[in-house]
Image (spheres, grey):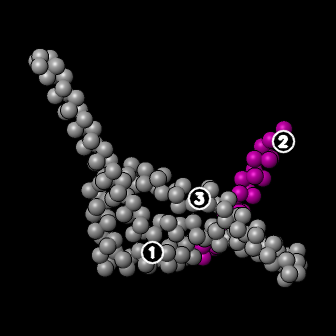
Amino acid sequence: MSLLRMFGLCSAVFFALISAQAGADSSSHAAEAERFLKLAKADRLTVPVYAQVQQMFAQRFAETQAPESKKASLERYQSKADAELDKAIGWDKLKPELVAIYTSEFSERELEKLNEFYESALGKKMLAKLPELNARSAQLTQSKLEGAVPQVNKLLADMTAELDTQKKP
């Protein structure tokens, strides 16, 4: 075998090994992101959307004062709405993009550390309490904001009045 041919073969093997390692690194990175998403119960992110759509259909059904005998029609439309939501935001649609988001923001090692934390007792407690903490935080912010709304609306009205007077010759 000629030296040039041997070099070409070795180069091809070397690049194949590098490519395989990069693919393995990429797939293990994605696996860590998937592990994190599973721990965070990200597949449940859209549950409130589905529930809200179901409620909209039920409310419209009630508003039309449809007889109970037409409930099968409501359920049929709710199923169709779920199918449309599945096409748009089903877990099989979101997961690859969420994995891409997390792998772009966190290294594989960072995801490993996050996963270790969220698998710990404290991490599990954090995941369990996070929705309640977020809701309470939003409620607190909303209640504090209510005091500022009248003043902000007055400032908006004052600015509008000032700008309107400046338009007039």
Find disc 2 in the rendering and name its residue: 168
Which mark identifies residue 89?
Answer: 3
Could you tell me residue 7's position as x and y percent? 14, 22
Could you tell me residue 158's position as x and y percent? 73, 57
Which mark identifies residue 130?
Answer: 1
Is-magenta flag for residue 147? yes
Neighbours of disc 2 within 10 Å: few (<14), some (14-19), many (20+): few
Sequence-wise, the earlier of marks 2 and 3 is 3
The answer to whether 97 is drawn above or below residue 123 in the figure is above
Q: Which residue: 34% across, 71% down? A: 118
Residue 69 in which image quadrant: bottom right
- Spatial separation of the CA atoms under disc 2 and disc 3: 51 Å
Q: Secondary structure at mark 2?
A: loop
Kindly identify the amino acid type of the residue bearing the numbered disc 1.
Answer: Leu
- Closer to us: mark 2 or mark 3? 3
What is the span of residues highlighted in magenta in the rendered image?
142-169
| Residue 38 located left or right of residue 158 | left
Residue occupying the far bottom of the picture: 68
Kindly identify the amino acid type of the residue bearing the numbered disc 2.
Answer: Lys
